[in-house]
Image: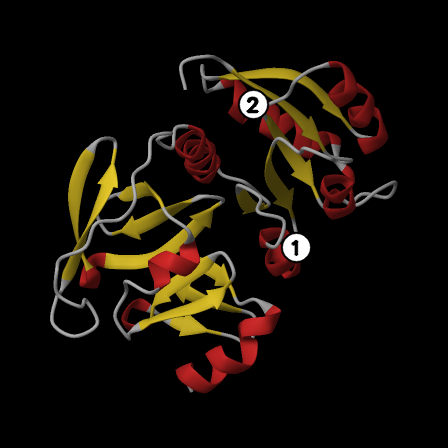
């Protein structure tokens, strides 16, 4: 993205707004349009002005951040900022960009903003996944994906997890993240048996799981939610 990212902050805590404002001001790619302690005031701004990204608290007395997002017909990018981890699963059901737990460090904030930029920069040309002529579930140890007009080789054992971004998937590996145009349901068919769909937006490499609960799995300190409809199958597989 070459243009400035217009963002707003919605949080009922003044100290939280102050910290996020400081983080925003550290990044020249971000332009803070306004901040609000009352989410209803943010509604009025969104009717008048186009906003690219919202840093949004979840627990607020007037309206929760989750209900705020659900009420928007065409929500911009949403990064939740909250002191509570227990909303992670529900927030990912809304296809938000990220979920930041307070206190938010600048490093974690930067990673979240970069994730948003990556999503906005996803290639617009048709870049369907190209795999080897052999069945990957049987003998191939890699696949090729089209990204930025290149055929990129991706070794299965290097994939940590796969994330859905509407009509694209983001492949998370040790070295980098790769975005390619594909539906996650179609991409799932091209992966070997050690990959497991745990959420409508996530497929994980079970060999890379370091811990799990009834609500999420952990891969390299990243907590990935388990969708309600997948929970029974995931628990049976992991146990």
- The quadrant in which the C terminus is found is bottom left
Task: Give the secondary structure at mark 1.
Answer: loop
From the viewer's perspective, is 69 left or right of 210?
Answer: right
User: Which quarter of the figure has residue 205?
Assistant: bottom left
**Residue under pointer 2:** 22
Provide residue 94's location: percent of width, then percent of height. Answer: 63, 49
- The residue under the point 15% across, 59% down is 142
From the viewer's perspective, is 68 left or right of 175?
Answer: right
Q: Nearer the viewer, residue 130 or 12?
A: 130
Specify the label residue 36 is tagged with: none
Q: Nearer the viewer, residue 105 or 142?
A: 142
Q: Nearer the viewer, residue 235 or 129?
A: 129
Provide residue 195's location: percent of width, then percent of height. Answer: 32, 69
Q: Is residue 179 above or below residue 118?
A: below
Q: Is residue 131 above or below residue 205?
A: above
Number of residues whose C-alpha sits closer than 10 Å to that of mark 2, classed few (under 14), some (14–19) or many (20 or more): few
């Amino acid at each position: 993205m070459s243009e400035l990212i217009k963002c707003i902050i919605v949080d009922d805590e003044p100290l939280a707004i102050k910290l996020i404002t400081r983080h925003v001001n550290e990044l020249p790619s971000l332009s803070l349009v306004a901040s609000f302690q009352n989410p209803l005031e943010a509604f009025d701004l969104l009717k008048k002005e186009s906003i690219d990204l919202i840093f949004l608290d979840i627990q607020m007395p007037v309206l929760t951040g989750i209900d705020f997002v659900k009420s928007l017909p065409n929500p911009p990018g949403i990064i939740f900022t909250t002191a509570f981890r227990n909303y992670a699963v529900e927030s990912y059901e809304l296809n938000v960009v990220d979920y930041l737990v307070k206190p938010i460090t600048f490093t974690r904030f930067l990673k979240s903003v970069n994730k948003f930029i990556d999503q906005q920069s996803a290639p617009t040309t048709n870049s369907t996944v190209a795999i080897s002529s052999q069945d990957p579930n049987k003998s191939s140890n890699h696949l090729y994906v089209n990204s930025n007009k290149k055929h990129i080789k991706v070794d299965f054992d290097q994939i940590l997890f796969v994330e859905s971004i509407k009509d694209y998937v983001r492949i998370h590996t040790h070295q980098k993240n790769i975005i390619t145009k594909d539906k996650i349901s179609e991409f799932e068919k091209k992966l070997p048996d050690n990959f497991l769909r745990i959420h409508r937006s996530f497929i994980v490499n079970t060999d890379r799981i370091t811990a799990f609960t009834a609500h999420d799995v952990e891969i390299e300190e990243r907590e990935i939610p388990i969708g309600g409809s997948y929970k029974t199958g995931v628990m049976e597989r992991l146990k």
